[in-house]
Image (cartoon, rainbow, N blue to C red):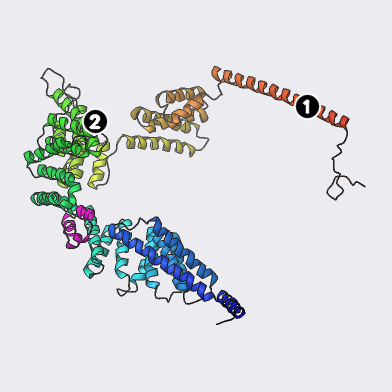
């Protein structure tokens, strides 16, 4: 047994020995960092087990663990800079913790630091891929692509090659290059890489990309892939409804209806039962089963009043009555019901627009179907009906029929006279519909050629030549006015080239120039070049001919007829060269002067009062004498040198 003195000596020696051993402190920091890192990963695993698709939301408890990792590893790097063995692990854990927290810029900097100092470390593959991922999340797409190119250069044996292909597909999709994104994902699936869960997510992304491109068959193939069954309920529901939409576009209506019925019977999707039922009712209408579809939608609307489902159901019924049955009064009632169910919803707003447009069409059609002695539709009203059918009611065929009737029997205000402007517009609108909506280029080209032959010199003829890919030879009014104005300008330029001694020739050309500008204003009065021509004529009178009175007459005409143009506003300034002050401005100036005088008087009185107070205080101070508590300083900073 140790004596008390020897025991104390041994205790003090052990204490100082442990204090001097930095290894214990070092391993304590790294142990705590590793433990915090593992605890953070465990929290993440628990969260993802309950929400497998949640890869972005980080709990506060997880963030606290990663903050502790950063703190402990930073302390190791600060206190033990010479320890080479564990420095890479500390830097790597710091970078990974920043990535887990979503602080992408900080993670990128740490990954760069790791590569700069530990480029031959075993963790470099993970560093290269995770840095590219962080660059993508930080929206540094060009640099992320460069980082991935370095990874692909290492070949398929790279540890994160499959993940890099998936990331490249995201970059390609972000760069609006869906074909490249599809190629990258298809390459991953063809190579058999990735876990079953990740392959299911890739199928879902591929289906969405193909769907956006309108490739319904390929999209349906990926929506129905077996791996999709490994996703959670929400994503399986999205895949199922996506497959239904593809079948609808492919006009596989029986298959789509059967798929929706299976979804309705599946208890996993009980929360989306009404969504599937409404869509089944819409598909029944598309399939030609009008009575069944209307019955199902009416049942949904009556059983769920004032809901989004009711608004959608009523809109679907109105759409069917309008587009298929052409029963416009019933369609108006259905659209009203949709708007009344939920006015602010998407279906309510669309129903309101359809209802208003249908009401206008019905009113105009009633006016046109009146008795022979009653009022007839004007050509503008008939063209308005065609516009409503095309842009508001999605009835392309009805718009074409209306335009055909207008082209055949164009008239103006019941007078039996064709309105050339509306008639030309109707011809062009009909050709445009065949070109853009019907995709019938043969019929469209024929109609464009008819416009060029029948309406020469119009904007529609010029645009028709452009649509046909021909050299534009048609001139509209603006083109002709521009050519006439250039001709007048060339006459003025020719005057400057005539020798000064040829007075008679100069006078003749000057007169011709004035007449040329006049012709522009007379022949093309509704164009901008008419205003420019009048301005040029007035300028010549004022600056070249010295005829100020004639110039003022032209300026006054320019101000009257083209006051909203640039040259009209300039003419106003020419006619009012002097500054004019109105009575209101004079009264406002007088009030400001009076306010200024009152303010000056107030400041003067205040200044006099302050000066009086100051003088009284100085006089009192002289009478009272110096204070006994005054301290006289005798240093180099004082004003006087006291002895």
* Residue numbers of the magenta segment: 216-238
Question: Is residue 145 highlighted in magenta?
Answer: no
Q: Residue at point 79% right, 25% down?
A: 612
Residue 480 in picture, x, y percent from top left = 33, 36
Q: Residue at point 14% right, 37% down?
A: 317
Please tell me which residue lies in front, 479 or 395: 395
Residue 525 in picture, x, y percent from top left = 35, 28
Q: CA distance from mark 2 to mark 1?
A: 87 Å
Q: Quadrant of residue 408?
A: top left
From the image, give the main secondary structure of the stretch colored magenta.
helix
In this rendering, is residue 531 above or below 230?
above
Q: Quadrant of residue 5?
A: bottom right
In this rendering, is residue 130 above or below 53?
below
Task: From the image, state whether disc 2 or disc 1 is nearer to you.
Answer: 1
Residue, disc 1: 613
Residue 611 in picture, x, y percent from top left = 78, 27
Q: Quadrant of the N terminus?
A: bottom right
Tag 1 or tag 2, which sits nearer the N-term?
Answer: 2
């Amino acid at each position: 047994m140790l004596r008390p003195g020897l025991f104390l000596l041994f205790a003090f020696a052990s204490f100082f020995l442990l204090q001097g051993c930095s290894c214990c402190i070092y391993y304590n920091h790294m142990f705590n960092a590793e433990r915090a890192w593992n605890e953070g990963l465990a929290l993440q695993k628990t969260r993802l087990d309950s929400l497998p698709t949640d890869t972005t939301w980080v709990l506060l408890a997880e963030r606290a663990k990663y903050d502790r990792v950063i703190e402990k590893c930073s302390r190791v790097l600060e206190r033990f800079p010479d320890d080479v063995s564990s420095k890479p692990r500390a830097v790597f854990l710091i970078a990974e913790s920043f990535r887990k927290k979503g602080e992408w810029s900080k993670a990128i900097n740490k990954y760069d630091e790791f590569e700069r100092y530990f480029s031959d470390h075993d963790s470099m593959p993970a560093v290269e891929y995770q840095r590219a991922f962080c660059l993508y999340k930080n929206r540094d797409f060009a640099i992320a692509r460069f980082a991935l190119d370095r990874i692909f250069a290492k070949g398929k044996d790279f540890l994160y090659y499959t993940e890099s292909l998936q990331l490249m597909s995201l970059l390609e999709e972000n760069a609006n290059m869906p074909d490249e994104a599809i190629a990258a994902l298809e390459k991953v699936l063809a190579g058999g890489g990735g876990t079953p869960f990740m392959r299911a997510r890739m199928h879902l992304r591929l289906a969405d990309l193909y769907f956006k491109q309108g490739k319904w068959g390929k999209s349906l193939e990926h929506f129905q892939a077996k791996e999709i069954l490994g996703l959670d309920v929400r994503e399986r529901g999205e895949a199922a409804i996506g497959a239904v939409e593809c079948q609808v576009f492919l006009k596989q209506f029986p298959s789509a209806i059967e798929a929706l019925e299976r979804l309705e019977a599946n208890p996993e999707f009980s929360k989306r039962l009404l969504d599937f039922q409404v869509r089944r009712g819409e598909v029944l209408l598309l399939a030609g089963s009008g009575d069944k579809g209307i019955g199902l939608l009416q049942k949904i609307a009556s059983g769920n009043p004032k809901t989004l489902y009711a608004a959608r159901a009523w809109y679907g019924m109105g759409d069917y009555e309008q587009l298929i049955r052409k029963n416009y009064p019933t369609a108006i009632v259905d659209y009203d019901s949709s708007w009344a169910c939920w006015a602010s919803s998407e279906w309510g707003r669309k129903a309101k627009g359809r209802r208003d447009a249908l009401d206008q069409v019905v009113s105009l059609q009633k006016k046109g179907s009146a008795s022979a002695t009653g009022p007839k539709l004007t050509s503008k009203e008939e063209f308005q009906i065609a516009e409503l059918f095309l842009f508001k009611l999605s009835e392309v065929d009805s718009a074409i029929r209306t335009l055909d009737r207008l082209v055949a029997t164009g008239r103006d205000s019941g007078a039996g006279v064709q309105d050339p402007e509306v008639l030309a517009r109707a011809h062009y609108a009909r050709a445009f519909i065949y070109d853009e909506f019907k995709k019938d280029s043969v019929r469209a080209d024929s109609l464009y050629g008819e416009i060029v032959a029948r309406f020469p010199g119009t904007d529609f003829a010029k645009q028709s030549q452009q649509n046909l890919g021909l050299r534009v030879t048609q001139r509209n009014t603006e083109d002709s006015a521009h050519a006439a104005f250039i001709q007048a300008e060339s006459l003025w330029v020719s005057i400057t080239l005539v020798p000064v001694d040829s007075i008679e020739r100069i006078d003749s050309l000057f007169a011709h120039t004035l007449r040329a500008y006049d012709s522009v204003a007379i022949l093309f009065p509704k164009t901008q070049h008419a205003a420019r021509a009048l301005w040029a004529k007035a300028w010549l009178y004022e600056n070249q001919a010295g005829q100020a009175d004639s110039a003022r007459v032209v300026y006054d005409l320019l101000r009257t007829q083209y006051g909203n143009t640039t040259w009209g506003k300039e003419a106003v300034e020419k006619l009012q060269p002097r500054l004019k002050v109105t009575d209101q401005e004079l009264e406002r100036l007088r009030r400001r002067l009076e306010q200024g005088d009152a303010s000056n008087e107030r400041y003067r009185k205040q200044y006099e009062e302050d000066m009086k107070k100051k003088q009284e205080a100085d006089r009192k101070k002289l009478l009272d004498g110096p204070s006994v508590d005054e301290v006289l300083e005798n240093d180099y900073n004082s004003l006087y040198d006291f002895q």
